[in-house]
Amino acid sequence: GVSGLFVGGIAAETMSFNVEDKLNWLRIIKSSVKEKVPIIFQINNGKFEDMVKEIRDAEEAGADIISFSQPYPIPLSNDEIFQFLSKLIEHTNKDVMIYNEPTIGKPMDVSLINKLIQSNNKVKFYKDSTHNMIDLHTILSQNKNVSALAGSDGLIFDIMNAGGVGVVS
């Protein structure tokens, strides 16, 4: 019944591991599941050049989908976040998940999420941890080709009822 796995998140114990540790998790998981389910890998590095290398390494290790969240810890403007993420997206050949996690930086608002989705045809997934159901409904209604995932335990039921396709909790 599992339709995908998420490796390398951005919270809790993940923050205490280095990139190579997370890539090793990816390799182990990929060898275990083979091609049965897609694996989403979160890119978390702070420096752009390091993130580009992490994308290449994750793809080589078997990631099927690359996930990006807003840069942190410095809150950037919408334009700065858009430019940063769009440039990163150019460096992957895989489908992309945008992970809106407001606890690590400036929350991405509806206009920014829509612009990222509509400007980058690789963006196929959106993980929402904002607790803002009105914004989520707006994003889903304007982007029928994007699959939404719940990122907050408290809203799993609501997000699934709104058209979400899964949970990364």
Image (tube, grey):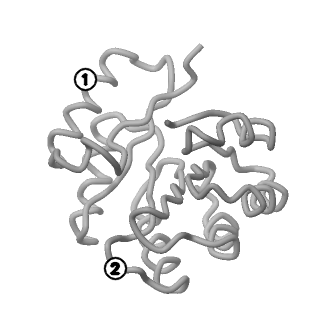
Residue that carries the numbered disc 2 in the rendered image: 74
Amino acid found under the numbered disc labelled 2: Ile
Residue that carries the numbered disc 1 in the rendered image: 28
Spatial distance from mark 2 to mark 1, Cα to Cα?
33 Å
The local crowd at label 1, few if under 14, some if 14 to 19, many if 20 or more residues have their Cα within 10 Å, is some
Q: Residue at x 23, y 71 (%)?
A: 47
**Residue 51: x percent and y percent?**
28, 62
Image vertical order of residue 20 relative to residue 49, above or below = above
| Furthest-right residue in this view | 141
Classify residue 71 by image quadrant: bottom left
Amino acid found under the numbered disc labelled 1: Ile
**Residue 160: x percent and y percent?**
73, 36
Q: Quadrant of the N terminus?
A: top right
Q: On the picture, is 148 further left or further right than 58?
A: right
**Front label number (2 vs 1):** 2
Among numbered discs 2 and 1, the one appearing first in the sequence: 1
**Residue 119: x percent and y percent?**
65, 71
Image vertical order of residue 9 relative to residue 5, above or below = below
Circle number at residue 97: none
Q: Secondary structure at mark 1?
A: helix
| Furthest-front residue in this view | 154
Q: Residue at x 55, y 52 (%)?
A: 129
Image vertical order of residue 6 relative to residue 76, above or below = above
